[in-house]
Each structure stands twice: as C-alpha cells, then as structure tokens.
Amino acid sequence: ARQKVEKYYGGIPPGPPLPKHQAWVAKRSGTQRDTVQDRVPQARVYRIWNVPGAHTPTSSLLQLAAQVLGGGKSSRFYKRLVFQDQLATSATASNNLGEIAGQFELVLTARPGADVAKLEQAADEELSAFMRTGPSEAELQLARTVILARYARLTERVGGFGGKSDLLAGCMTYTGNPDCYKGDLQRIKAATPAQVKQAMAQWLSDGDYVLEVQPFPSSLAAGAPLDRSAAPALGQPESLNLPPMQRSTLSNGLKVVLAERHAAPIVNFSMMVDSGFASDAPDLPGVASLALRMLEEGTPSRSSLAIGEQFEALGANFAATTNLDGAFVQLNVLKPTMAAALDVYADIVLHPAFAPNELARLKKDQLAAIAREKTNPNTMALRVIPALLYGKGHAYALPMSGSGTEAAVARITRDDLVAYHQAWFKPNNATLLVVGDTTLADITPLLEKAFGAWKPGAVPVKNVRTVPPPEKSVLYLMDRPGAQQSVIYGVQLAPPRNAPDALQLGVVNTIFGGSFSSRINMNLREDKHWSYGVGARLPAAVGQRLYMSSSPVQTDKTPDALAELVREYLDIAGARPITAAELKDAQ
C-alpha cells in the first residue's frame, strides 16, 4: 500500500502549512428562538446547545446523557413524550461531535394534531428533572451497554461509512492519534451518575437555541511526475470468498441457513416469513405492515418498554419490516448475550400481544404516513400504479408502500392482526437466516429451545396469477396542485425474477434507465437539461414484476419529455437497438 501511495502521490509537491484550530466552543447565554414554516407534514422542535468537541471527557459524558434522555425506547423522552403522553411520534437526543466543538441536540417531532407548546413543556420537565437528579445507575448501565455495543459493531467492517477505517481515520484527523477511541471507551466505562449530572449542569443549563418548524397552512400554495495522460491499467479483481451456506431444519420444519463470520463478536438473525403486503386481503390492505410494526409493542409476558430495555441491556438491536412478498423479523446481538436475546426474540415472533392501546397509537401513525404519501408526487403515483397494471383482486394490486388505505386502516382490529399472524407465521412458511460469529453446532440447540414449540400448519395461497399486459398504451394524469415539477412514470409488466431471461432484462434496464449513463438519463438530463435525474428499475417480486421508469422534469417541458420517453421506449426495441459498446459497458 505504501508503494502505491508513493507512486501516485509522492511526486505531488506539498502545499503551504495549514493552521489547525484548537478547541473553540462558542458557549452561549440565554435562549434564542426562531420559528420557520416548511413543506413538511408534521411540526418539529430543535433545541441545541454548543458543547465541547469529539474525544474529550465531556463529550463522553454528554453522549451517555443523550442516550438516557432520548436514545431509545427505554429513554425518558420516549416513555413520556411518545408512549405516555403521545405528544410526539419521535423524541431524540444526540451529542453531535466535531473537531473543535460539538452540539447537544434535542429533536421533538410532534404527533399530527398535538399541541407543540405542550410537547415542549413536557420535554422541558423531563430535561429539568434529569438535570436535577442525573441518571440512575440502571439507566447509566443501559446507556453504557448500548454505546459500547455500537463501538463493537464499528469493528465488524473494515471500510465504508462507519467501519474500522472511519474510526481510525476520524481519530487521526481530530487528535493525531488513531486509537484515541480507546480513551472514549474507557471514559464511558468509568463514568458515574454524578459526573454525567455535572457535565449537564455545566453545558445544558444555559445558552440554548430553539428552532420550531411548522407546516405551511393548508390554505397556502406549495409553494517524478507520473504520466497522467491515461488512467492506470486495471489490476486483477480480488477473488470473492463468501462463507459457505450451511443448512439445517429444526424439528418443527423451520429451515435454518447459516453463514459464519468470525471477524467480530456479532450474530445477525433474520426470520423471513413468506407473507408480505401480498398477503393482505384486497378489501383490507395495510394489515401486514401494521402487524409487523406491532410485533415489538409487547407480548403477554413483556411490555413494549420492557422489550426495549431488555434488548438495550443485552446490547441488541431489533427490527421488523415487510415488503411485497415477505415479512422480516431481525435481531442483531453480541455473541455473549445471544442466548438471552433469543428468548426475547422468540417471544416477539411467536407471541405478539397486539395490545389494543398500542394498535390505536400505531394506526394513527399509519394514517399519518398515508397522508404524507398523498402529498408527494412520487408516492402518489406508487399508490395507484399496481392496481392499474395487475387489476382488481390480484395480490399485488395494492399501494407499493404497503401502508394500505385510510378506510382500510381505520377498520383494522386486533382480530385482523391475530388472524394474519396465525395464518402466515408458521415454521413451515419461514426461513431463519443466521450470519455471524457462531456455528451450526452451537446455534441449533439454542434455536430448538427458542422455536421448537412453534407448530407447523396449513398456509394460505396468495393470488399472484399471471395477468396479460394491457392491449394498448394508456396515459393517466394525476393533479398535484403546487407541485414544483412533473413526474412521468412509464410502467409495464415484466417477467418474474426467476424467468429464464431475467438476467438479460436486467442488462437491458442498465442500458435503458438503470445507470447514470443510461439512454433516458443522458437524453433528459445531460442533453436536454430538463431533469436532475431519470432512471428505471425492476422492483423485486415473486410473481410478475413492474418495469418502471421515473422521470421528474421541469413542468413546462412535460409534453416534450413524455414524447422523448416514448421514443426511447420504441427505439431500443426497434430503430436504435442496443450497440456492442453499450452491451460491453453494461456487462
């Protein structure tokens, strides 16, 4: 590596010395407040203090304070503002660190219809109480576990954003010492409640800036010199060495796939259930999405807050998501706490409570999400496109986000979620993917203990029948008053991803619209300058897929852009077929 650096950079003369700033915290006094309006669906309050920068004793203490105050579901903000008072959909605290200074930031996102003044008052009460007493020993230990687990995950990857290289380079840039993070870890481990309280009193008792962001009223419009004449010759690509896929089946039919990775003491679990948005009844879309969001909201033996606290104490991360064809329940955990975390994980997968009070809260959130989708031209289109192509009754003829419709979400009951879970969450309809620092011999007994009592059974069949393409092209118009530009979608049915010519279709898409140098992007962006970016894609699906091009263009060029897109669609299959050069570049 050093030889390559010398070769390519050694001949470049150094520039003048650059001054290096020392610590410079712009400590403020008093409170300054501003209010702005923006095109956003919810009100939000930012509250910020200038504080010391990265890799200092104070930064470590304030990092712990932020985690306790607003770092997760066990935080004081979440319990009071989101869960108890339901004034906010999100309430976080973070200590954002720079080289010469940092900023301690509170971000409060008001629930639609909530009183922002009451939200601020409740947040201030929690902050004031926290500053009077400091964190409890239990809160501090939870925060310490979460932060140390975050550092452990940084060591799981070598490069990229957030890997080992980032950690070392950041320390080198900020302090001149690549392993300065070790001091941060030591300070976090040794911190006491009294020290955290003192740091907050010193830096958060005065000098805050408050910015309130409000949505525009609905009545307003939306508004030795190296020869650089040629690029260096490409070297041989590194060989791709993937771990072998090891497979087994538990006694109840649950398939397990393991890929061993022993670089870091981390194990990832992903329970993949064959359901997804496509499992929603045509007259009740939104059930699958809501059910997956409800999983971590409690079981008969664990409340939502208890689950959050247990996972944080174990240094574990949990997520439940769904897409068109599948539901995914994921756990990321440190190896030493894996067995304990699996007990909580299995309880969530097998025994969701679907508590009515939690359902009412999340239904409000889902209705707010649908309202946001209906304000954005892109998501407006994606809500109606599937039904136009697949037709009534097809499993894919639903809004592409999976959020459903207002009428359907309003009708969803706990019984609907229970029925969904009982119908689709079966071991014979799921696969558990495990990646990380474990072996099949070690993990199998733990999985049998956690999931062995899960009973198999019959599973419904999704209606993903093959539908014929439209007999002729159809143009649909959607009006979005005040939109700053037009968005043109070109959509047609494409074969499933397991079709014999699926790979070739992917290459065609790369040439037509799947890359920066694609035909439609070079035409509308680079040549005509009518768009900032145009592209096409093939969203994943088990059945017939949608081939979609998306073209945001300046409004006065909408007819011309539409004509150009139609010509490009016709040309690639007719007058201007793919060239050998295009094919080589795409390959």
Image (spheres, grey):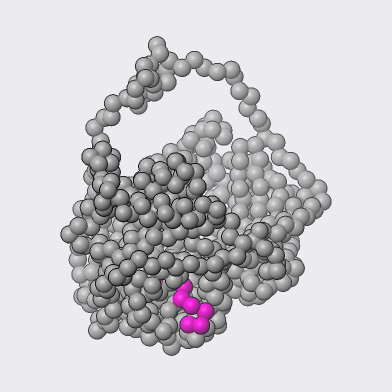
Q: Is residue 451 visible?
A: yes
Q: Residue at x 55, y 44 (%)?
A: 184
Q: Residue at x 42, y 66 (%)?
A: 475
Q: Quadrant of the N terminus?
A: top left
Whether residue 514 sits left or right of residue 465 in the image: it is right
Q: Quadrant of the C terminus?
A: top left
User: Which is more toward the observer, 52 or 363?
Assistant: 363
In the picture as drawn, the residue positioned furthest to the top comes out as 224
Q: Is residue 149 visible?
A: no
Q: Percent position (x, y) of residue 117?
A: 75, 68
Q: Percent position (x, y) of residue 68?
A: 60, 60
Quarter of image, res 71: bottom right
User: Which is more toward the observer, 114 or 284?
Assistant: 284
Dominant secondary structure of the magenta stretch? loop
Q: Residue at x 37, y 62 (%)?
A: 491
Whether residue 209 sits left or right of residue 229 in the image: it is right
User: Which is more toward the observer, 352 or 108?
Assistant: 108
Q: In this picture, which residue range is highlighted in magenta?
A: 400-408
Q: Percent position (x, y) of residue 7?
A: 37, 19
